[in-house]
Image: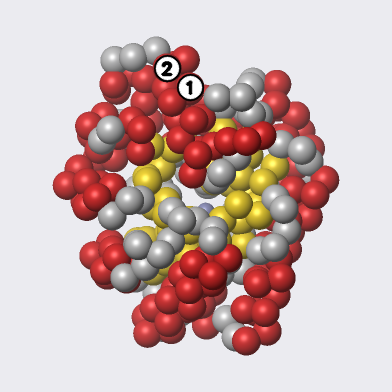
Amino acid sequence: MIDSHCHLDFDEFKDRRDEAISEALSVGVHIIVNIGTDLETSRNSVQLADVHDCIYATVGVHPHDARKYNKETEAELVQLSDHRKVVAIGEIGLDYYRDLSPRNIQQRVFHKQLELAVEKKLPVVIHTREAFRETVEIVREYSHRLTGGLFHCFPGTVSDAYDVIDLGFEISFGGVITFPKAKMARVASEVPLKHILLETDSPYLAPVPFRGKSNQPAYVRFVRDKLAELRGITAEEVETITDRNSRKFFRLVDMFEG
Ligand SMILES: [Zn+2]
């Protein structure tokens, strides 16, 4: 199993990071992608990837932190992105729900990092909240030059999902699909499986039966199981296909058979 999105460097894991990693490995999670959200967490992600075979990293500045982005930030991101275990630029995008950075700055910083991804031939991990259309319009401009894009914790409808897939992007689902009456569950049950990746977004959004508690990569199995239930196939089938999708997206293909 692959957890395509988590934040093991966050403070919530301070006293139990190694336990969380061993627990993940013990339930069959063999790859964890740790996601950067600003310069510090990007550095920390790379550091975790250096220490743990199973961890890969992304580097980037989240829309919340867009106002902190400057030339020095960019220079360091460029440098970090050359690390052999950095597999994407992210998480980047727009968040008009919390508006922690002014919208025009969020957009500018999003553009800058999309350019960086094109230049570095890395895919992008996208965060979008209350800004789906605007996000799609921006990534559309880059879709032919990017090596890939992933809308994480997919927030849209079935038809939104097809818009994104038509542009050559993938989508990922986490614990939210296990919540009763989740709108996302319908999207997860209809969209072609070959475009779906699994994630936890740990320490956030723990799936049922741990909803409301702290999330960890080992819980990606509950997302897998829910997706299997929604689609009427086995957990093994979901695992095989979504693992393949993640390996392809992050270009981990060569490192594993299949
Ligand atoms: Zn995240």
**Measuring 37% from the left and 46% from the top, which residue is drawn there?**
170
Is residue 225 visible to the viewer in this orientation of the structure?
Answer: no
Spatial CA span between label 1 and label 2? 5 Å
Residue at which label 2 appears? 237
Label 1 secondary element: helix
Q: Which residue is mark 1?
A: 240
Image coordinates for residue 49, horizontal then vertical, percent: 74, 48
Left or right side of 105 for 255: right
Q: Amino acid at mark 2?
A: Glu
- Residue 46 versus residue 199: which sits nearer the camera? 46
- Image quadrant holding the C terminus, namely top right
Residue at (43, 61) in percent of width and height = 146
Q: Quadrant of residue 23?
A: top right
Give x and y (percent) for residue 78.
65, 72
Q: Quadrant of residue 76?
A: bottom right
Q: Amino acid at mark 1?
A: Thr
* 52 in relation to 36, above or below: above
Residue 158 versus residue 127 in the image, above or below: above
Residue 212 higher or lower than 27, as above or below: below
Which residue is farthest right? 51
Q: Which mark is residue 195?
A: none
Q: Is mark 1 within 8 Å of ligand 1?
A: no
